[in-house]
Image (spheres, helix red, strand yellow):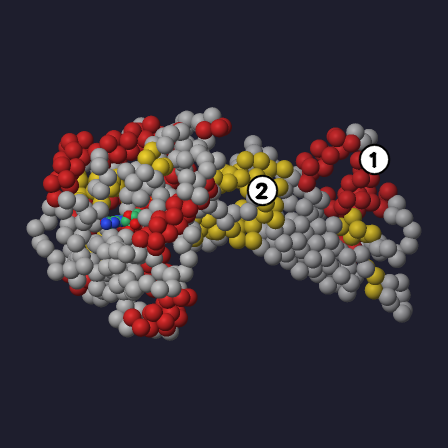
Amino acid sequence: MSGPITSRPLCTRCLRSGASSSVYSALLPSIRTYSSQPYDDHPEDFSDIAGELKRRKRKADAKRRQYGATFVDHALVTVRGGKGGSGAAALAASLRGPSSPCGGNGGPGGSIYVSTSSSLTSLSTLSKRLIGGQGSSGSGAFKHGRRGSDLLIKVPIGTIIRELVREGEEERTLREEGELNLDKEERRKRRWQKWFVTHPAAGGEVSNREYAEAESLMRREGRWVPKTPTFEESPPVSLDLSEPVKEPILLASGGSGGLGNPFFASPRLASRGALPPTQTFEFELKLLADVGLVGFPNAGKSTILRALTGRKAEVAGYQFTTLNPQIGVVRLWEDGTWGGGEGIEVVEETWVERERDEMARVLGEVIAPDSVPIPKLMGSSTSSNGNIDDYDKTHDTNTSGKVERIRFTLSDNPGLLPSASQNVGLGHSFLRSIERSPVLVYVLDLARPDPSDDLLTLKHELEAYKPGLSARAGVIVLNKGDGVEEDEGKERLESVKKVVGESGQVVVLSGKYGLGLERLVALLAERVANARLEGPVQLDEVPVHVAPEDEVRRPRKDWSRDDGVAFGLKRDRPDDDE
Ligand SMILES: Nc1nc2c(ncn2[C@@H]2O[C@H](COP(=O)(O)OP(=O)(O)OP(=O)(O)O)[C@@H](O)[C@H]2O)c(=O)[nH]1
Ligand SMILES: [Mg+2]
């Protein structure tokens, strides 16, 4: 286990700040510091490296065990508007004449609305059962009950909602009566008791005649519980929320409030509030982004998203860091500069930033990232003098006086595993989420020995899920172009180009150090503009291969990385190092 580090020299890479090291030394006992990669400043810290690796492996295993449980792209939700409050059966005492009915009506039940939120990318926040607030009952002196509170469900843009089942009060009652095998008279009595409130102090039993008169009065006035229309009479709700919703859309209305006894001109009868129909809705998420990043775990998709859009996607050196798709916005201006989010920085692993924030919190001052030596991008002739000021000059967040040429959305997705098309790993949920992106980008790790092999596997998985899907990925990114030897890198680039042929463009870049991004932005902008001219992607219903129960969300085979960390370990496989 790696714990707090108490006596080690300050690593300039993990605590980059201008503050004096003595300040940090004083704080070190309370702060855990790990270096992301290079420990070359103090190679004697081997114990920490081992600790850090163990910590990462544990985290990766935990994530793998979850199998993406936080990404929910399909949900069945039972929804019912709130029940109306009961009317009151009250009498106003009068000194001169007989007392008169003065019960107020019940308040209507709350309704359920749906709206979109651009910050959501999963349906995991949806409850299985949603019920609107109940209206409160009326009371004496003509006091009407309060309306029940409405519920607003927020879903990500790209959610499709379909109504599957609808059962109203009338149908429910009929079903119950059928089950109880009641005769006609018993049914009527049961309904009256269910539908009317009686005044406890108004004396005597309510006669059948009184009930019957009250019922026919309600029917005449259209206040008796209405029959819920069947799907033939009124088609089921079907919504495709592919655009942000301006006004919340009504999914289920609340029940009307009951009537007070003045309606019946009766001293002892009032009606109960209506119980609205129970509806079951299917929510399905098909995320909408102009460009979708597709790649194996750890290829650097989240790093690229952060570098291009500033969206705070988690970046870490273990697989399945991303479990929910993330969407960011890229903006390209007429002068050729581009930007998004917070702007220029070397994309660190998220834990480095967290610790810097923690340090800033303890010190009470903002800690700027220190200069980071920027390595050379493979194949580029320009050498860097290793300062953050040399960072990609075309990335600019200053928008003043600029004319925007195009703006597009980019989605980072969970890592794909071989056999994802058979629902292994995050499987279909992940593939469904990229289905709507007209432009796809394969992200490959140039540091892996055979990226062309990875490309073939990715292509195969997309084709197996939906024929033609892989053709949308015309841009192939070879990421981590900063860390490879020139010869080795060129060889890998050539092998990828051979697989790609004429069908796509290959870009070598470094998401982490922001090198080579301008070419990627230009290519994506062109492709997105063309795709927009062609119109939205047609979503024909794809017959999806459903894997047998025991294969679902369970990787079939190990897919090992060079460093020995295996993908797709079985859920119950014991930890090797613990
Ligand atoms: N040297 C170098 N490292 C990079 C580069 N891009 C990403 N990395 C590192 O690669 C690791 C994985 O990066 P992520 O962006 O989290 O990868 P991912 O594809 O989103 O991974 P998953 O979410 O698990 O699918 C992190 O340690 C990054 O710092 C790069 O261009 N150069
Ligand atoms: Mg990621």
Q: Secondary structure at mark 1?
A: helix
516 above or below 423?
A: below
Q: Which mark is residue 186?
A: 1
Neighbour tally class for label 1: few under 14, some 14-19, many 20 plus, Cα within 10 Å: few
Residue 63 against residue 202 in the figure, above or below:
above
Amino acid type at image mark 2 = Thr
- Residue 78's tag is 2
Local secondary structure at mark 2: strand
Q: Nearer the viewer, residue 164 or 76?
A: 76
Residue 417 visible to the viewer: yes
Q: Position of residue 392 (x, y in %)?
A: 17, 57
- Residue 523, picture quadrant: top left
Q: Would you place residue 475 above or below residue 32 in this image?
A: above
Residue 365 position by quadrant? bottom left
| Residue drawn at x 16%, y 37% as measured from the top left | 492
Q: How many marks?
A: 2
Q: Residues within 10 Å of mark 2 (few under 14, many from 20)?
A: some
- Left or right: residue 550 versus residue 443 is right
**Looking at the picture, which amino acid does disc 1 mark?**
Glu
Front: mark 2 or 1: 2
Q: Along the line of sight, which residue is nearer the eye, 311 or 19?
A: 19
Give 78 or 309, whichever is nearer the viewer. 309
Residue found at the far front of this picture: 44
Asked if the residue under mark 1 is in contact with the one under mark 2, i.e. CB atoms within 8 Å, the reply is no
- Disc 2 residue lies near ligand 1 with CB under 8 A: no
Q: Is residue 244 visible?
A: no
Left or right? Give the position of 371 relative to 286: left
Earlier-in-chain disc, 2 versus 1: 2
Q: Position of residue 204 (x, y in %)?
A: 92, 51
Residue at 30%, 60% (x, y): give it: 14
The image shows residue 191 at horizontal and vertical percentages of 78, 41
